[in-house]
Image (tube, helix red, strand yellow):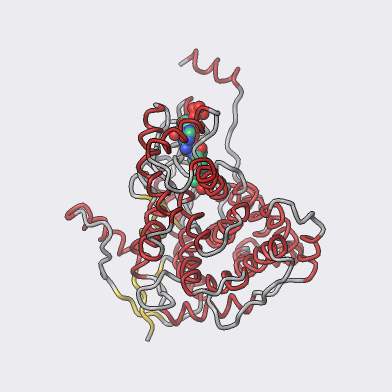
Amino acid sequence: MVFYRSVSLLSKLRSRAVQQSNVSNSVRWLQVQTSSGLDLRSELQELIPEQQDRLKKIKSEYGKVQLGNITVDMVLGGMRGMTGLLWETSLLDPDEGIRFRGLSIPECQKVLPAAKPGGEPLPEGLLWLLLTGKVPSKEQVNSLSQELRSRATIPDHVYKTIDALPVTAHPMTQFATGVMALQVQSEFQKAYEKGIHKSKFWEPTYEDSMNLIAQVPLVAAYVYRRMYKNGDTIPKDESLDYGANFAHMLGFSSSEMHELMRLYVTIHSDHEGGNVSAHTGHLVASALSDPYLSFAAALNGLAGPLHGLANQEVLLWIKSVVEECGENISKEQLKDYVWKTLNSGKVVPGFGHGVLRKTDPRYTCQREFAMKHLPKDPLFQLVSKLYEVVPPVLTELGKVKNPWPNVDAHSGVLLNYYGLTEARYYTVLFGVSRALGICSQLIWDRALGLPLERPKSITMEWLEKQCKKA
Ligand code: CMX
């Protein structure tokens, strides 16, 4: 018999428990539901009508309820704080950080199946959770691993398309190009051309999404091996799970690196809907562009230095610190270096966030990983020093809303420790992981029949007139 834990009920009761005892990270086993042991697609098939009804009810009963006032600052400030998107797979709390379907990262680490007892969550389990809101059993995760492996073959033209680019092209350019080349196999596009009924849109979207999730590690690994290992590629290993297989195809065989990759792919997957990559994917998909087109667009947003490229920037910046001041830099010297960076008109990469107002739990779990596996690593020690030095400096600057580190402040030193030293490649890893979150939501976009996104824009003249009247 297979067991599920009901996450929605878990979240409701958990938040009550948190209010009462402030024990936010302890997972309570509140309800165990028996399952018929369905595969992921059948599971979704069952959930979709119920969620469609739920959305219909919200629309009809609460359609006119106001969710806040839009101010001029919000319009001019990149829509910060403006609630305007439906995103089911995760929700970000400014202080607490991300919850995937109601579960925090420490809770996911406790309840999602791992490759070994007490190990990091398997990304397949997270994918199941994102898509269904339910925690899968190990057997279900194993069968999803198997399904993803069976979908992980890519046509030859994808490699040729990437090969048409100079080998020096940025890895994100090569990766996004590879994803665009995968698009020619889109089931959604074929079905749409044949005239599929809109009630069935989610089905080819599911097929495309699962193929895409299964295939992005191959494209990413190809880019890595092409750029840094003379094109000497490594085939997938049929015995490995998603995260471990990705590490293996990149060329890393240590079990610690496999664990790191499982953790990495899990925590980078989703961060609610408003961040640049997720929002871009959702926006493009709202025009009924297929998952490949939508995800390639998302990757182009992820490639910006204020978003996903920050992980590259962090390691390069840390290495520049070491080059100039050595590994044993004092806190005073480090503070001077941070000010030098700020005074030259640059940001301190890896710190700050558009929504978060506390240390990112994605940073914290990577820090815990480092304390467990590489406590003496000089670069980890430097990252720890930065945790003490940077926030007071950013606070002193007076304008930074969140001086604390984000996910990108930590990932590079972990990868570097295990031999993945090529910082320019790091955002590709982030991109592979993002496929899980963006595609999960995209399937729900189609299942719920979410509309074309089309917010209203205005001119400065319109704003001036409107504000004078107010
Ligand atoms: N270093 C220097 N200045 C910073 C800063 C940082 N780490 N974080 C914010 N600021 C500045 C902003 O540039 C802005 O300055 P101006 O008013 O002169 O334009 C001011 O402080 C206010 O910004 P904010 O409201 O606190 O932050 P935003 O929501 O505008 O920006 C972010 C958020 C992430 C772009 C910003 O904190 C930043 O640039 N951080 C460094 C880059 C980074 O780590 N990005 C990765 C984020 C996580 C991810 O998406 O992967």
Residue drawn at (74%, 67%) of the image: 231
Judging depth in this view, the residue of 81 and 359 nearest the camera is: 359
113, 455: nearer the viewer: 113
Residue 152 location in percent, x, y?
65, 74
Q: Residue sitting at 48 percent across and 25 percent down?
A: 72
- Please state the total of marks drawn on the protein image: 0
Q: Residue furthest bottom?
A: 1
Farthest residue, direction top: 468
Place of residue 163 in the rendered image (x, y in percent of width and height, measured from the top left): 79, 61
Residue 165 drawn above or below residue 1: above
**Above or below for 59 versus 27:** above
The residue at 46%/48% (across/down) is 327
Q: Can residue 275 be seen in the rendering of this structure?
A: no
Left-right relation of 307 to 156: left
Q: Where on the picture, by quarter, is residue 100?
A: bottom left
Q: Residue at x 39, y 80 (%)?
A: 35
The furthest residue to the left = 20
Does any portion of residue 81 appear in the rendered image?
Answer: yes
Residue 441 % position (x, y): 53, 58
In the rendered image, residue 68, in percent from the top left (x then y), is placed at 40, 35
Instruction: Determine whether 252 is above or below 85 in the image.
Output: below
Front residue of 13 and 409:
409
